[in-house]
Amino acid sequence: MTSLTSYDPIDISSHAFWAGSDRERDLAFAELRRERPVSWHPPAEGSLLGEPDEAEGDGGRGPGYWAVVRHGDVEAVSRDHRRFSSAPEHGGVMFEDVPAEVLEMTQSILAMDEPRHNVTRRLLASAFTPRRIRVIEEQIRAQAAAIVDAFLDEGPRDLVEQVSTRLPLWTISEMLGVPQEDRARVVGAVDQMVGLHDPAYVGEFGDPLMALMMGIGDLHDVAQNLIDARRSQPADDLMSALVQAEVDGERLSDDDIRSYFVLLAIAGNDTTRNTTTHGLLGLAEFPDQRDLLLAGAGADLERHLPGLVEESIRWGSAVMTFRRTALEDVELGGRRIAAGEKVVLFYSSANRDETVFADPWRFDLTRDPNPHVGFGGGGIHYCLGHHVARAQLRALFRELLTRVPDLVLGEPEMLAGHFMHAVKRLPCSR
């Protein structure tokens, strides 16, 4: 086991690195996977807390983080919640440093350790009854059909605006009961929070922290209005179920519900939106896979649809990074990680790990097994809404492939940043 005192020569912390393409970035990650799967790096550019402290852990290395880039190591850290913390008091889950109060307002169960995590997750999960899940899935199928109706009526122009963005927003809005007049406000708030370091948003709002706080304020305002409305007049929606949820005498506070609303708005919106877009880009890049889906007059589509969903999640790697903090000295990948030091999980790298995925830069519907970490690396923080995301992807892919099989995609315009692998615009035509 070895300890490091100097930074790795490969830069994976700067805005310049994350402004490159995913293939350019993976050249760096591939070298790290081969030679230094756990490596020490300077803090991510763009901290919202100013300059980091000179000592962040007990290792004497100064400010920085350990980069975890191999699939197996990402899973190991994800499943070891007793030694690797997600809680705001230990730094939270975001790659860059973010104020603890911001994490409390936005991350919900993502940024909780036990026992608080288990209590809150059980309360949240209690709202997803089998009947409610059936209703949500029926809504998703109808929404996907209506979205493609409108897409064909309008004429293909921008896949992100006309298709990818609409389904997750509509699903979440219907699930929670968000009024029609507030839905554009929710999307705008999510975009500016996810695009925290994108020049377009920094220029508009002055600085990243201002953009973040304004987005949080908008989402909390929408959430609180819904909480108040459902307390006085319950409806058949998820917000009413959250307000009424009770397990072993415990109930969710307004703070809990507002934070979960933000998590749903981002994790349940932007992830599906970008996975849809990346999946269709994968089919465009590998037309033999598209042919595989469209052969056999529909039977092959249904047979290969689950594979398309899982490969799109791996290929797109919508969430690229999350962070943990070591609570005690730990050995990982031959390195000694000291208590208090930060550990960043690079999901996009894990999903291209050559030792796990044969020909990882090939989009392959028949990949089996496909142990991607698109919903996290397992453990207590595995995505609570994975079933909803998969239902959305199945419904939208089915509608597009059966009704717009001749869709032609242009060059995507990517969002700059290290959190979400996001496509801002994607020209399309027939």
Image (spheres, rainbow, N blue to C red):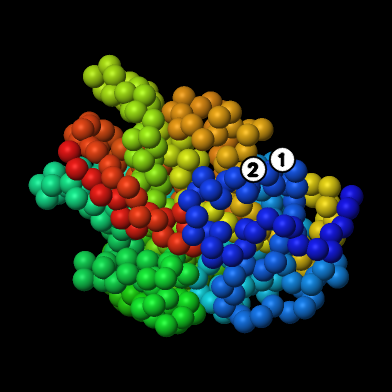
Q: Which residue is mark 2?
A: 30
Residue drawn at point x = 40 percent, y = 63 percent: 265
Position of residue 149 in the picture relative to residue 184 (left or right): left
- Residue 11, given in percent of the width and then of the height, sits at 65, 59
Identified by mark 1, the residue type is Arg
Q: How many numbered circles are shown?
A: 2
- Residue 392, given in percent of the width and then of the height, sits at 34, 45
Question: Relative to the observer, which residue lies in front, 111 or 150?
Answer: 150
Question: Relative to the observer, which residue lies in front, 236 or 85?
Answer: 85
Task: Report which quarter residue 225 is drawn in.
Answer: bottom left
Question: Relative to the observer, which residue lies in front, 409 or 66?
Answer: 409
- Residue 260, given in percent of the width and then of the height, sits at 47, 66
Residue drawn at point x = 85 percent, y = 67 percent: 59
User: Can the viewer see residue 100?
Assistant: yes
**Residue 34: which disc?**
1
User: Can the viewer see residue 127?
Assistant: no
Tell me if label 2 and label 1 are in contact, CB under 8 Å.
Answer: yes
Task: Report which quarter residue 183 is drawn in.
Answer: bottom left
Question: Relative to the observer, which residue lies in front, 114 or 123?
Answer: 114
Position of residue 65 in the picture relative to residue 252 (left or right): right
- Residue 350, given in percent of the width and then of the height, sits at 61, 44
Q: Residues within 10 Å of mark 2 (few under 14, many from 20)?
A: some
Q: Residues within 10 Å of mark 1 (few under 14, many from 20)?
A: few
Quarter occupied by the C terminus: top left
Task: Name the residue furthest top.
Answer: 296
Residue drawn at point x = 43 percent, y = 68 percent: 198
- Marks 2 and 1 sit apart, C-alpha to C-alpha, by 6 Å
Identified by mark 2, the residue type is Ala
Residue drawn at point x = 23 percent, y = 37 percent: 407
